[in-house]
Image: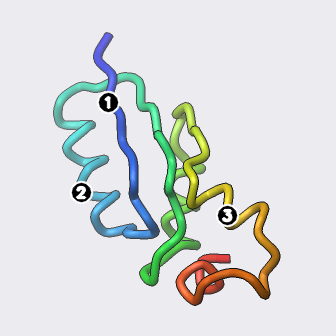
Amino acid sequence: MRFAAIADVHGNRLALEAVLADIRAHGVSEIVNLGDMASGPLDARRTMDALMALDAVHVRGNHDRCLIDRPFEKMEPWERRAY
């Protein structure tokens, strides 16, 4: 069994797609996502759609917890966009 760990995608769907293509090319069967998935100014929605479509273990990172636990009015601008 081969596995890959990914982390700190921060809403960068294009980079995620490139990494996933490389993972597939190397015959990886298991993926662990270590978090910080959506926060950032790029493409949070489509990034999360791609991550949710994976058969992977996902762990919330500190940025993910902020998007879930922090009130909207206390979020930074980049968090609000991802929210």
Instruction: Kindly identify which numbered label has been placed on residue 18.
Output: 2
**Residue at the (37%, 69%) spot, across then down:** 12
Residue 56, position as x, y percentages in the image: 52, 34
**Residue at the (41%, 24%) spot, across then down:** 30
Judge by depth and name the residue closer to the eye, 58 or 17. 58
Judge by depth and name the residue closer to the eye, 75 or 54. 75
In the picture as drawn, the residue positioned furthest to the front comes out as 74
Q: Mark 3 points at which residue?
A: 66
Judged from the image, the secondary structure of the residue bearing numbered disc 1 is strand
Q: What residue type is labelled 2?
A: Ala
Q: Which of marks 1 and 2 is nearer the N terminus?
A: 1
Judge by depth and name the residue closer to the eye, 50 or 35. 35
**Residue at the (82%, 76%) spot, across then down:** 71
**Image depth: mark 1 or mark 2 in front:** 1
* Quadrant showing the N terminus: top left
Q: Which of marks 3 and 2 is nearer the N terminus?
A: 2
**Residue at the (51%, 42%) spot, across then down:** 54
- Residues packed near mark 3 inside 10 Å, few (<14), some (14 to 19) or many (20 plus): some
- Residues packed near mark 1 inside 10 Å, few (<14), some (14 to 19) or many (20 plus): some
Judged from the image, the secondary structure of the residue bearing numbered disc 3 is helix
Left or right for 39, reference 71: left
Q: Which amino acid does label 1 sit on?
A: Ala
Instruction: Kindly identify which numbered label has been placed on residue 4.
Output: 1
Seen in the picture, residue 12 relative to 34 is either above or below; the reply is below
